[in-house]
Image (spheres, rainbow, N blue to C red):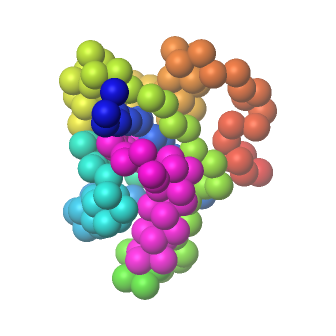
């Protein structure tokens, strides 16, 4: 084959440090477009973003020369710095948890995932983030130890 053809689409999930409810509706209005800009500046495409006060879901398409871990690191570092420069409503410092979950997305499942991410607030009226994340890991066949999934929660 004379050319390289790829579709690298990922579902990325990460939360605020200690899952503090820092992502207010007002912050969301500027945070989501800012994240889209970070992804675009690295040659990716933010297909959908959604979340609630303590975590986000991103559906992104990446170029093959950008590692997923680098993209997540850039998004988290740039947004933390930017939010802290803007100042959080009510004061305090903004930070993301150290880890994240990332899963490949097949084209046939993309419409379902996009809808799921779009309606995060509705989903979380019935299901906690912990329950949601554990269900995603199980569905994706990811081995995990639940004792280490949620840094600092309950400390």
Q: Visible in this render: residue 52?
A: no
Residue 45 located left or right of residue 79: left
Residue found at the far bottom of this picture: 85
Q: Position of residue 97 (x, y in %)?
A: 61, 55
Judge whether residue 146 is colored magenta.
Answer: no
User: Residue at position x 78%, y 33% from top?
Assistant: 147
- Depth check: 82 or 70 in front? 70
Q: Quadrant of residue 32?
A: bottom left
Q: Position of residue 74 (x, y in %)?
A: 49, 64
- Depth check: 119 or 4 in front? 4
Judge whether residue 59 is colored magenta.
Answer: yes
User: Residue at position x 53%, y 30% from top?
Assistant: 133
Q: Which residues are magenta?
A: 54-83
User: Residue at position x 48%, y 31% from top?
Assistant: 103
User: Residue at position x 35%, y 21% from top?
Assistant: 106
Q: How many marks?
A: 0
Whether residue 89 is situated above or below residue 32 in the rendered picture: below
Q: Quadrant of the N terminus?
A: top left
Q: Position of residue 34 (x, y in %)?
A: 29, 66
Residue found at the far front of this picture: 2
Q: Visible in this render: residue 92?
A: yes
Whether residue 118 is situated above or below residue 23 in the rendered picture: above
Residue 8 located left or right of residue 101: left
- Depth check: 63 or 5 in front? 5
Residue 12 located left or right of residue 151: left
- Depth check: 68 or 81 in front? 68
Whether residue 140 is situated above or below residue 119 in the rendered picture: above
Q: Position of residue 146 (x, y in %)?
A: 73, 28
């Amino acid at each position: 084959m004379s050319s390289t053809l790829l579709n690298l689409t990922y579902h990325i999930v990460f939360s605020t440090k200690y899952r503090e409810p820092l992502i207010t509706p007002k912050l969301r209005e500027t945070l989501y477009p800012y994240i889209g800009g970070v992804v675009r500046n690295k040659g990716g495409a933010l297909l959908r973003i959604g979340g609630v006060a303590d975590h986000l879901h991103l559906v992104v398409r990446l170029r093959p020369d950008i590692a997923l871990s680098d993209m997540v690191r850039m998004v988290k570092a740039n947004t933390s710095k930017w939010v802290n420069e803007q100042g959080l409503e009510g004061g305090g410092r903004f930070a993301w948890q150290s880890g994240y979950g990332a899963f490949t997305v097949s084209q046939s499942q993309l419409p379902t995932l996009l809808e799921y991410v779009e309606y995060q607030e509705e989903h979380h009226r019935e299901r906690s983030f912990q329950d949601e994340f554990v269900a995603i890991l199980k569905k994706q066949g990811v081995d995990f130890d639940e004792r280490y999934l949620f840094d600092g929660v309950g400390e």
